Amino acid sequence: MIVNVENLVKRYKDNIALEHFNMNVLEGEILGLLGPNGSGKTTAINCILGLLNYDKGIINVFGEELKSTSYELKRRIGIVPQDIAVFYNLKVWENIDYFCGLYIDDNSLRKKYVEEAIEFVGLEGHRDKKSQELSGGLRRRLNIACGIAHKPELIFLDEPTVAVDAQSRNFILDGIKKLSENGATIVYTTHYLEEAEELCDRIVIMDNGRDLVTGTLDELKNMIATTEKIVVEFINPVGDTKKKLESIEYVREVQNIGENGKFILKFERGHNNLSVLLDFIKEENLVYETLYSETPSLNDVFLELTGKELRD
Ligand SMILES: Nc1ncnc2c1ncn2[C@@H]1O[C@H](COP(=O)(O)OP(=O)(O)O)[C@@H](O)[C@H]1O
Ligand SMILES: [Mg+2]
């Protein structure tokens, strides 16, 4: 285990930001910390990194507690903070060189690492620009380069795609996959479900300072009772179609989408729901245009656990 957090409690005066929060990070994985704004992601990361004091709990990184003087440990860790932390008056390469220089003393090695980081985030055409001249998306990429140039084994990225354009977002997500393929262990916080689904090997779902559930995408989806979602669009719906659909065995919920004949049915898992539905349609002489089965999304998992949507 690369990181272990047990029963972490953090209060900001009367506000409890973390309430017995637990998390562990396994070697080589991309762990996603997924939760709405204010759920405690940044607080958790900053406690782990020793940047914040906490009230209770155990935190180990590479088997040790991280202190402000743990220089050897810090060299092995990369931090990409949520709030962009670069020097606006320094050039792109100078910024990266500064942060890399905190860990890498050897001049020629540092030079090499700086150029590799510039290439990694695709800022070759901007290396001599001051960071204040960069667009938001490019500045995000610089922020990432500063955190990873020294080739850390463990990398924390705190919401690195917020407020960036689609192109930079894809660039960033691909870059993180590459870091992972190169062997780094990654902790990635986000409030975007789609990113967690796309990127992460395991996901910790957070809400109100707690870890609600932890697992792979499949494990999380299997935790909720409703797993099978069938979408059907009828050409000839009648007034009581919804009621009738609700009477089908193992149906937990039927939603009628809009004014038309489109319905979403949520079935209990583990039954031949699709064939039962097809039989029903035949019996009722209904005609459908589209019909497909969907596995639940992370949003369904979040909804079932918290009763609210995790969407922007
Ligand atoms: N410096 C601070 N002082 C007081 N409250 C804070 C501070 N930083 C965060 N909080 C509160 O702690 C909770 C968790 O915040 P944060 O860790 O930033 O969540 P997230 O990163 O998931 O958006 C929120 O209620 C937030 O308002
Ligand atoms: Mg945050």
Image (cartoon, grey):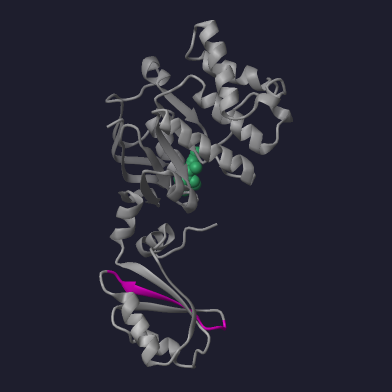
In the image, 293 versus 5, the foreground residue is: 293
Name which residue lies at 38% across and 63% down. 295
Name which residue lies at 30% across and 35% down. 26
In the image, 48 versus 73, the foreground residue is: 73
Name which residue lies at 42% across and 33% down. 180
Name which residue lies at 38% across and 77% down. 253
Q: Quadrant of residue 307?
A: bottom left
Depicted 73 relative to depicted 37: above or below: above
Location of residue 38 in the rendering, given as x and y in whole percent from the top left corner: 48, 49
The answer to whether residue 88 shows anywhere in this view is no
Q: Quadrant of the C terminus?
A: bottom right
Main secondary-structure element of the magenta-colored stretch? strand
Is 267 a magenta residue? yes
Q: Which residues are magenta?
A: 259-269
Q: Quadrant of the N terminus?
A: top left
Location of residue 248 in the rendering, given as x and y in whole percent from the top left corner: 32, 84
In the image, 87 versus 143, the foreground residue is: 143
The answer to whether residue 173 shows anywhere in this view is yes
In the image, 97 versus 180, the foreground residue is: 180
Depicted 86 relative to depicted 237: above or below: above
Is 178 a magenta residue? no
Location of residue 298 in the rendering, given as x and y in whole percent from the top left corner: 41, 57
Location of residue 305 in the rendering, given as x and y in whole percent from the top left corner: 35, 61
